[in-house]
Amino acid sequence: MKKYPLPTLAQLHTFEAVSRRMSFTGAADELCVTQSAVSRQIKALEMDLGIALFRRRHRAIELTRDGRLLFEAVTRGFDEIAHCVGHLRAATEAPQITVAASVAFSYYWLMPRLERFAERCPEVDLRVLAADQQVDPGKGDADVAVLFGMGDWEGIETQRLFGEKVYPVCSPDYARAHPELLRPSDILDQTLLHLDGGGTLWGAVDWRVWLARQGVTGQPVRRGIRLNSYPMVLQGAEAGRGVALGWSYITDEMLASGRLVCPVAKPLETQNSYYIGASDRRKQDPAVAAFIQWIMEECGSAESSA
């Protein structure tokens, strides 16, 4: 004798689809069967139970009182089964997280270090979303995001990575060709490389702001070069096309390697910082927590070696 004297799963599955959509045709489309097959399943279920589950109206159906009771019970059962199956599937799948950061942060800072994260957490499937518009992890666009600002984002728990420090950079050849470039005011007579359309991850620091904060008045003498990608700006600086603004978390290593030099040692430090952030819900995920811990350690190592 069966422990659970129930109708067949096919009958209950068909009944749930018809009741939810209130349409035999709609249920047939969802289940990829014919309408007559749906009608046979519902008729067999009603005969098994000995009750009518639907009232047939002109071009419409509605649940009877008994039909509503069965629909509520079947929905609860299917919801619980689906939740359990989803949990079991998640336990066997590799954890996946999406990390959002600016194009420059992703390219210059994150990518060279990702191998170390993969060695620490080989089971995590990591996706990098590179975009120069700030992504809100609280809205589900990413699990973790590198954010720029004052650290006050509603619904997002953040930890500070490092501050914003900006200074001029150029190639060694450019510096040798312009020995007069010694003071902030000397910048005005140089070819300046500008970042256009940097998005919200670059704050408000540009050449105008940097020069003003150094007490320099006046306008650049030469025509500048405007680029809409920070990697292109740095490529132009390396190629000797002019002087660019360097953000320390990117260009400190380029100075150390000799690819670039800082002709005027007058860094501008703002009140903004870079943060790693996750929503209150996602921060509890083990893979998200592991990534946050790893990036905090990487930033600590970078600052201690700077």
Image: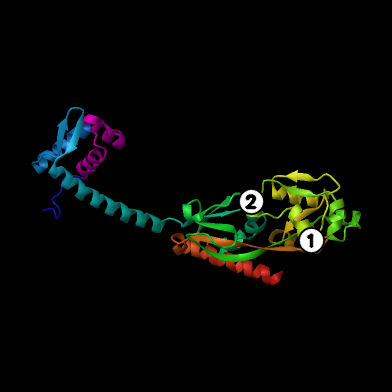
- Write down the region rendered in magenta: 9-36
Amino acid type assigned to the residue bearing label 1 in the image: Gln
Q: Main secondary structure of the magenta part?
A: helix
Q: Where does label 2 land, which residue?
A: 103
Q: How many marks?
A: 2
38 left or right of 189 in image = left
Residue 18 lies within the magenta run: yes
227 horizontally vs 184: left or right:
left
Q: Secondary structure at mark 1?
A: loop
Q: Where, by quadrant of the figure, is residue 285 drawn?
A: bottom left
> At 83% across and 59% down in the image, what residue appears?
184
Q: Nearer the viewer, residue 181 or 175?
A: 181
| Quarter of the figure with residue 112 | bottom right
Could you tell me which residue is drawn at 88 percent across and 57 percent down?
A: 181
Residue 89's spot in the image, x, y percent?
37, 54
Q: Is residue 235 visible?
A: yes
Q: Residue furthest bottom?
A: 304
* Residue 97 shows in this picture: no
Amino acid carrying mark 2 in the image: Val
- The residues tagged by marks 2 and 1 sit, at their Cα atoms, a distance apart of 28 Å
Find residue 214 and name its label: 1
How crowded pointer 1 is (Cα within 10 Å; few <14, some 14-19, many 20+) is rated as some
